[in-house]
Amino acid sequence: MTSSSHRDFLAIPDFSSQELVALFDLAERMRRREYAARPLAGKTLAMIFMKASTRTRVSFEVGTSQLGGHALFLSPRDVQLGRGEPIADTARVLSRYVDGIMIRTFAHQDVEELARYSGVPVINGLTDLLHPCQILADLLTVRQHLGTYQGKKVTWIGDGNNMANSWINAAWRLGFELSIACPEGYEPADHLLARAQEHAKITIVRDPKEAIHGAHVVNTDVWASMGQEDEQKKREKDFAGYTVNKAMMSLADKDAIFLHCLPAHRGEEVSADVIDGPQSRVWDEAENRLHIQKAIMAVLMGGEVLS
Ligand code: CP
Ligand code: NVA
């Protein structure tokens, strides 16, 4: 059985540019508490977490409840998926009970397979390839503090990981400039980059100082993502010189903001005086996860129309 006509959110380009703008508008109404509807009343979101989470778990669970619905936390220790039940079977069974599925896992193909066999909307809560909800929250934070992402230069310093890949997808859809600095061997996904570079100015350089020059948004992430813990020591060597510290920030635009999806390793990818300093917007960024995901769920699961 393949899926019915539901709409998933697996990657940022699943929404058109116009829809993304409407989604941000809706999330901002939610942040301003101007949205009182409860489009998820009587509905349930299943949340599958094959990896740890603080922000994603809590923001989806609280967000579902604020929209009138109920969220179920499913960990591999408790559900049969953790004992090898096929994803396709899990998708078909869950679809008979719930109205949406959020999943955080390793292989992106697993999320695509889940969506293929699910009869209800599937939302990507992070894979090794992408972290789309986070980047939408980041863009919401950019709108909140800089007014717009249009005409801004966004810099990514560090690993070409799920975050970097989602920034590439966002630049493709929304057309802002993206400058990525990563060491050799840590580049973002080729296929996403090639597609996006046809429409947006995206550069990959080795020198973080070059990438950050004049940037309006400075973004980094841990050097070893979940599942890469064994590579921590090697990565610390390979990423030497990539710490976002005050000297590095001084090369950005004077009104630049610093973003980090969290959790952060102070003293590694970012210095404490930057992440805890005046240009940091990481707490608003974390809060914005709640607002943007509520907007996504209202649209995908609650019949809210983007206009
Ligand atoms: N940024 C983020 O996704 O955080 P969690 O891993 O805590 O969900
Ligand atoms: N790149 C990080 C993001 C965590 C929210 C990871 O995948 O672990």
Image (cartoon, rainbow, N blue to C red):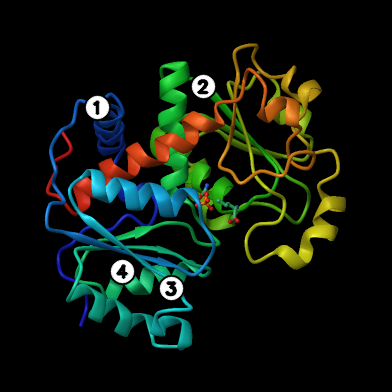
Where residue 152 is drawn, which disc sits there?
2
- Circle 1 is placed at which residue position? 33
User: In the image, what residue occupies the spot 78% across and 42% down?
Assistant: 268
Q: Is residue 40 above or below residue 100?
A: above
Residue kind at label 2, given as amino acid type: Lys
- Distance CA(mark 3)–CA(mark 2): 34 Å
Left/right placement of residue 22 relative to residue 186 reads left
Left/right placement of residue 26 relative to residue 302 reads right
Q: Is residue 22 above or below residue 198?
A: above
At which x and y percent is residue 262? 59, 43
Judged from the image, the secondary structure of the residue bearing numbered disc 1 is loop
Mark 3 closeness class: few <14, some 14–19, many ≥20 residues within 10 Å: some
Q: Which image quarter is the N terminus in? A: bottom left
Sooner in the amino-acid sequence: mark 2 or mark 4: 4
Residue kind at label 3, given as amino acid type: Asp
User: In the image, what residue occupies the spot 81% across and 21% down?
Assistant: 247
Judged from the image, the secondary structure of the residue bearing numbered disc 3 is helix
Q: Is residue 178 above or below residue 196?
A: above
Q: Nearer the viewer, mark 2 or mark 4?
A: 4
- Circle 4 is placed at which residue position? 115
Residue kind at label 1, given as amino acid type: Arg
Where residue 110 is drawn, which disc sits there?
3
User: Pointers 3 and 4 in contact (CB under 8 A)?
Assistant: no
User: Pointers 1 and 2 in contact (CB under 8 A)?
Assistant: no
At which x and y percent is residue 23? 27, 36
At which x and y percent is residue 48? 39, 67
- Distance CA(mark 2)–CA(mark 4): 34 Å
- Distance CA(mark 1)–CA(mark 3): 36 Å
